[in-house]
Amino acid sequence: MSEKSSINGNHNTSTEGNNINSCPYLGLQDDSATYSGFPSTWNICYRAQPTDIPALSHQRDYCLKPEHRECPVFVAEDKQKLPKAIKHHSKGLSHKTKKMMFIGAIGLLSILVILAVFFRDYWTGVLFEGSPILSGRIDESSQSQESTPTMFTTSTMEEMTESPPTPTIIQPSKTPMDIEPSPTKYDPVLALDTPIGDEYEFIIHRVSEGESLQIFAAEYNTNIEAIKAINYDLIAPLWINWIIIIPMNITDVSDLPKFEAYQVTEEKVDIRFLAEKLSANLEDILFYNNLDSDHVLNEGEWLLIPHSESES
């Protein structure tokens, strides 16, 4: 296995200290003295005002290298806003924004239901104004018409006793017109804390303070032995910010290989090229990540990289 710079081995923790070649203003959102050793949205620039997340490509080329001394924010005399060119731009709406939109939609729907109930009688009268019974209003003309008796003549009675017309039966077409809808292909989400896989499902998780193997086993319906068995490089005790792989709803992992988590650091990466680069089996990568062979990887996505038995 090669290219471990994007895997677990290079994580910085509060017990390790920061790399002297990296920018001293780089730190985690909740700990300015610690940062992730690879490009990550967990890293923020404390030199910027306000603090912000540098682009992953900028972290790779400057923040995590001696070249950070050439960064325009680093060399500026005063703190300044992070330039748009080197600022990380998240894709899609944030979870908080989606939650607020959902709550707003529920509130609007509730208001509409309340208005519909209160104004039901009014709108019934407006929509059915031509019908005295439905509108709840009976005028004098309708009363006089109802009080007038109906006279039937002999011809009228004969017409009423005639046989009803024969209904026309429409035969269904002998040619079926069944049209099957075309399936829509959706690319799986390859992200932290999101189920990855199909036949077997896994969670790639970054360890937070206070978390343990016992907590993960209870939360994802597995056991500690299974978690230890599928992680290629697992430390004990767990370190904060360490990346761990957790099997979901399975305790017997004897048929599964060991896995290592890998984060893509470039845009539009061919998965066949990545498998060759990491000396990993392409079919196993496709199977355990539930991907097609023509899938193109994007920067920031996470993958499960299976190890062969010889590597274990």
Image (cartoon, grey):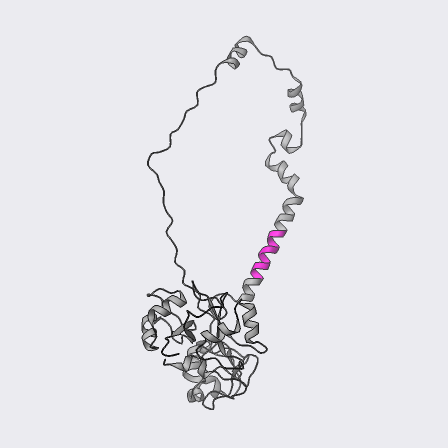
Depth check: give the residue in front, 156 or 171: 171
Task: Indicate whether 90 appears above or below 17.
Answer: above
Depth check: give the residue in front, 232 or 3: 232
Depth check: give the residue in front, 10 or 283: 283
Task: Indicate whether 132 appears above or below 197.
Answer: above
From which residue to which does the magenta span run?
Answer: 100-110
Residue placed at 43% from the left, 89% from the top? 66
Percent x, y of residue 309: 37, 76
Q: Which residue is farthest bottom?
A: 20
Rendering quarter of residue 51: bottom right
Task: Examine the structure image and report whether residue 289 is included in the region drawn in magenta.
Answer: no
279 sits to left or right of 55: left
Quadrant where the C terminus is found in the figure: bottom left
142 sits to left or right of 304: right
Count of numbered tags: 0
Residue placed at 39% from the left, 73% from the top? 306
Rendering quarter of residue 212: bottom right
